[in-house]
């Protein structure tokens, strides 16, 4: 008992310290990357220790001879990519824990990697309720984690990416990584009671005119997630299978286009002037038939059409009346 | 007794009606696409998109045939308004449509084998067939292959000017078509000119 007390105290103090440190860095995660030069330098030095091995360069020139290079090859990262991600400015050890401080890493270190919800608690709560209704939960509930789609070393939220084309490229890559890869798709479908063959994306989207163009211009989730009744809410994580997915072209291809509140909901500021166009925020990077149209020009064209029809019918009516009178006069 | 002259060779009549059918399909499907709205009861969007693409490509082929046949047969010469006095003749034609036609006056420039079209007709047909229709076809081709469009124009998507040109030139063709069909009723009888477009024989 006596000997245990000091060590318990030390553990408690260490835990308090770690918690305080974690909280300080986690607070940085919530907002922008840290700005304090001393902290930045500390994080840089700490991460450099990890990058010494866990990068392409580290793999080529491992700092130690006794490393399992095959295992290392599976855990390399691109520091540049990480710096462009949402988690830029974070210390690797915030998520990866103390088990990774020394080499070889602690055997149970992997199990101690922080869950996303530890920092993103509010979001996780909302996402989990949406996710449990998704097609992924239905088929792969236990195998599917946040990281199945969102690589925390790479991912950046749409509002920070800004350019809709880049949002599309990033987000669709998450889907096609599995849905366009027989290998990865098979690794997931292996747990299903009946093995599922990866459906060909072109075949399942054959109703979609110019599918390739759609895939480069909009995210899969524009159709494969339900519309939120609250437009300001983030995109739903309830991924819909083909039976429930949106198939009505007019959802996007109309003046009341869903694109404005989905992919382009952060883009309003991208366009200096809207020039009077409907869905002008979309026009910054795409022309969408039926959506990006000009109500004034449309009205002018319709008026011209109406005037032409009325004019021609009027002309015809006068001809008929005059011909009637002419006939009466001659008879 | 009516006087008949043979004006229109079969190739021209076949092209004309093919062109007419395609233009109608393109106009209806084009309006369905551009004015797409849950309250608009025209052609469903995906069907309209499909038909518009098919009819558009068919129109390109038909137009290619039209240009070639015009060169080969020399029919292109008919579309050239012949000076002198082109505008005076146009004006006379306009006065006829605005006044003379109501009083039963004869057409000021009835067609002959040498000159199918009056001056006004030649100018309007030339503008439509050699300026507006090529514009609508070329912009349509860019629509089919959007990579052909510039990436950005004044900070907006490069397809925007192409789309606007396609829309407005398409609208111009439709307005022409309305007037063209109506003027088809101005023969000796309301049906005579339509018959001519089928048989090739013009009746006076």
Image (tube, coloured by chain):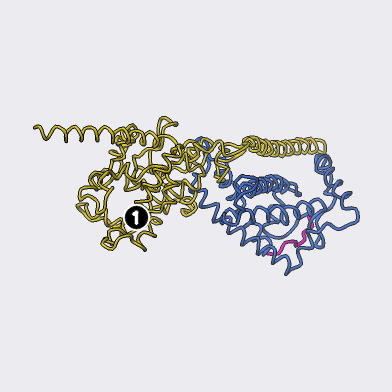
Residue B113, visible in the rendered structure: yes
**Residue A27 falls in which quadrant of the image?**
top left
Q: Position of residue A98 (x, y in %)?
A: 27, 44
Q: Range of the magenta residues?
A: B1-10
Above or below — where is A121 with respect to B197? above
Tell which subunit mark 1 falls on: A
In blue, which chain?
Answer: B
The residue pinned by badge 1 equals A54
Residue drawn at (75%, 54%), measured in percent from left and top?
B125
Horizontal relation, residue A321 to residue A3: left or right: right
Residue drawn at (39%, 56%), measured in percent from left and top?
A203
Q: Position of residue A316 (x, y in %)?
A: 73, 39
Q: Residue furthest top?
A: A230
Task: Depth check: give the residue in front, A265 or B61.
Answer: A265
In yellow, which chain?
Answer: A
Q: Position of residue A250 (x, y in %)?
A: 48, 41
Task: Depth check: give the residue in front, A54 or B115.
Answer: A54
Quadrant into which the C terminus of chain B falls: bottom right
Q: Residue furthest right?
A: B84
Residue A222, visible in the rendered structure: no
Residue drawn at (36%, 59%), measured in percent from left and top?
A58
Residue B6 is one of the magenta-drawn residues: yes
**Residue B199 falls in which quadrant of the image?**
bottom right
Q: Main secondary structure of the magenta part?
A: loop
Task: Depth check: give the residue in front, B129 or A328.
Answer: B129
Quadrant into which the N terminus of chain B falls: bottom right
Element carrying mark 1: loop
Residue A286 is one of the magenta-drawn residues: no
Above or below — where is A24 with respect to B145? above
Mark 1: give few (<14), some (14-19) or many (20+) Cα within 10 Å: many
Q: Position of residue A284 (x, y in %)?
A: 58, 43
């Amino acid at each position: 008992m006596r000997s245990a007390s000091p060590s318990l105290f030390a553990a408690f103090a260490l835990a308090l310290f770690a918690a305080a440190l974690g909280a300080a860095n986690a607070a940085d995660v919530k907002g922008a990357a840290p700005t304090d030069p001393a902290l930045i330098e500390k994080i840089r030095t700490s991460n450099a220790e990890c990058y010494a091995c866990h990068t392409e360069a580290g793999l080529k020139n491992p700092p130690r001879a006794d490393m399992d290079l095959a295992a290392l090859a599976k855990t390399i990262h691109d520091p540049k990519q990480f710096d462009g991600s949402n988690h830029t400015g974070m210390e690797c050890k915030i998520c990866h824990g103390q088990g990774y401080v020394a080499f070889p890493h602690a055997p149970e270190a992997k199990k101690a990697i922080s869950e996303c919800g530890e920092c993103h608690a509010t979001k996780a709560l909302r996402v989990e309720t949406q996710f449990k209704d998704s097609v992924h939960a239905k088929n792969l509930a236990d195998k599917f984690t946040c990281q199945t789609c969102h690589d925390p070393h790479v991912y950046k939220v749409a509002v920070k990416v800004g350019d809709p084309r880049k949002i599309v490229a990033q987000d669709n890559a998450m889907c096609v990584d599995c849905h366009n890869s027989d290998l990865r798709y098979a690794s997931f479908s292996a747990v299903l009671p009946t093995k599922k063959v990866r459906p060909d994306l072109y075949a399942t989207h054959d109703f979609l005119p110019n599918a390739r163009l759609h895939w480069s211009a909009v995210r899969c989730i524009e159709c494969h997630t339900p519309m939120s009744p609250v437009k300001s809410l983030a995109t739903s994580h309830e991924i819909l299978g083909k039976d429930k997915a949106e198939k009505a072209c007019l959802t996007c291809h109309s003046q009341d286009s869903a694109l404005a509140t989905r992919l382009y909901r952060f883009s309003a500021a991208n366009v200096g002037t809207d020039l009077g166009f409907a869905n002008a925020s979309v026009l910054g990077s795409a022309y969408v038939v039926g959506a990006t149209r000009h109500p004034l020009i449309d009205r002018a064209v319709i008026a011209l059409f109406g005037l032409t029809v009325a004019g021609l019918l009027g002309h015809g009516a006068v001809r008929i009346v005059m011909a009637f009178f002419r006939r009466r006069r001659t008879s | 007794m009516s006087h008949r002259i043979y004006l229109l060779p079969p190739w021209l009549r076949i092209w004309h009606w093919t062109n007419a059918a395609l233009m109608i399909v393109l106009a209806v499907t084009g309006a369905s696409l551009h004015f797409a709205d849950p309250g608009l009861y025209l052609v469903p969007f995906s069907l309209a998109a499909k038909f518009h693409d098919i009819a558009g490509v068919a129109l390109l082929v038909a137009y290619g045939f039209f240009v070639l046949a015009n060169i080969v047969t020399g029919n292109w010469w008919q579309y050239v308004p012949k000076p002198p006095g082109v505008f005076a003749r146009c004006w006379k034609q306009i006065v006829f449509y605005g006044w003379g036609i109501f009083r039963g006056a004869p057409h000021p420039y009835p067609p002959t084998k040498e000159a199918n079209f009056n001056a006004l007709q030649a100018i309007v047909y030339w503008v439509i067939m050699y300026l507006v229709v090529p514009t609508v076809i070329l912009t349509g081709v860019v629509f089919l292959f959007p990579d052909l469009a510039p990436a950005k124009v004044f900070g907006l998507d490069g397809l925007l000017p192409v789309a606007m040109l396609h829309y407005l030139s398409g609208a111009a063709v439709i307005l022409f078509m309305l007037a063209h069909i109506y003027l088809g009723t101005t023969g000796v009888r309301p049906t005579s000119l339509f018959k001519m477009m089928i048989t090739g024989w013009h009746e006076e």
